[in-house]
Structure formats: C-alpha cells, structure tokens
Amino acid sequence: TTEIYTLSLHDALPIYLCKAIKVGENVLGFREIQVIRLITNGLLDKQIADVLCISPNTVTTHVANIRSKTGQPTRTAIAVWALEKGIS
C-alpha cells in the first residue's frame, strides 16, 4: 500500500516513514524523501550516494527533481523547507 500525505507549501506535518508526500500538484517519492532527509543532515551528493547505494549522478537528478517539485532554488532552501515541514 502507498501512503500519500498532502502537504501545502505552508503546512507543517510530522512525517516519519511515509512513502510519498504530495506537494501541490507534485508527489515526492520515497527515495526523494530519503534524499531530503540526508540533505537536512548536511550530507553531500557523494555521501548521500554512498548511504543509499546509488550513483552520485542519480542523487544529482533526485535533488534537481526535489528543487523543481518544491520550488526551492538551493539545497539549503530544501533543508530549511524540509525542517519547517517536519521532514527531517
């Protein structure tokens, strides 16, 4: 089963083990949520890749998708947004 939480850009929601988060018209998938959590912990793409056993290029793609879906222009903005929403 898939749990999808709807999250507006202004709501805070405690999210622990969800599989997807709906942000506006977009959905952040499980892997993107994992990447966000690691970004909020200060990890770089190579470190995230090592933790998730994926390539750094895949991490870069996930980060670009996250930026697009959340409207956040930088990794720092993603981290701040995630912390405000309880995604960390």
Image: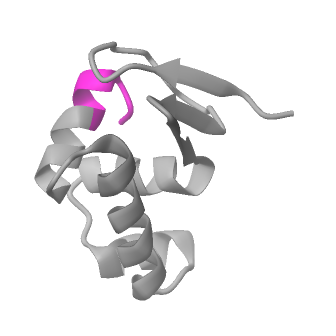
Give the image quarter of residue 65.
bottom left
Q: Is residue 61 left or right of residue 39?
A: right
Residue depicted at 12% across the width and 51% down the height: 76
Specify the color scheme.
one colour
Q: How many marks?
A: 0
- Residue shown at 25%/31% (left/top)? 83
Query: Which residue ends up furthest to the front in the rendered image?
Result: 25
User: x and y percent of residue 84 in the render?
Assistant: 23, 24
Where residue 46 sits in the image (x, y, percent)? 33, 82
Q: Which residues are magenta?
A: 82-88
Q: Position of residue 72 (x, y in %)?
A: 21, 47
Rendered location of residue 3, percent (x, y): 72, 28
Please state if 31 lies on the left or on the right of 57 as rendered: right
Q: Is residue 18 above or below residue 66?
A: above
Left/right placement of residue 73 relative to residue 44 reads: left
> Which quarter shows the C terminus?
top left
At x 38%, y 19%, the residue is 8
Up/down of 36 relative to 11, above or below: below
Rendered position, 74 above or below 78 = below
User: In which quadrant of the rendered image does the N terminus lie?
Assistant: top right
Q: Residue furthest right?
A: 1
Query: What's the residue at 35%, 64% (across, down)?
Result: 63
* Residue 12 forms part of the magenta stretch: no
Is 85 colored magenta in this rendering? yes
Judging depth in this view, the residue of 86 and 62 nearest the camera is 62
Looking at the picture, tell me which residue is in the foreground, 46 or 21: 21
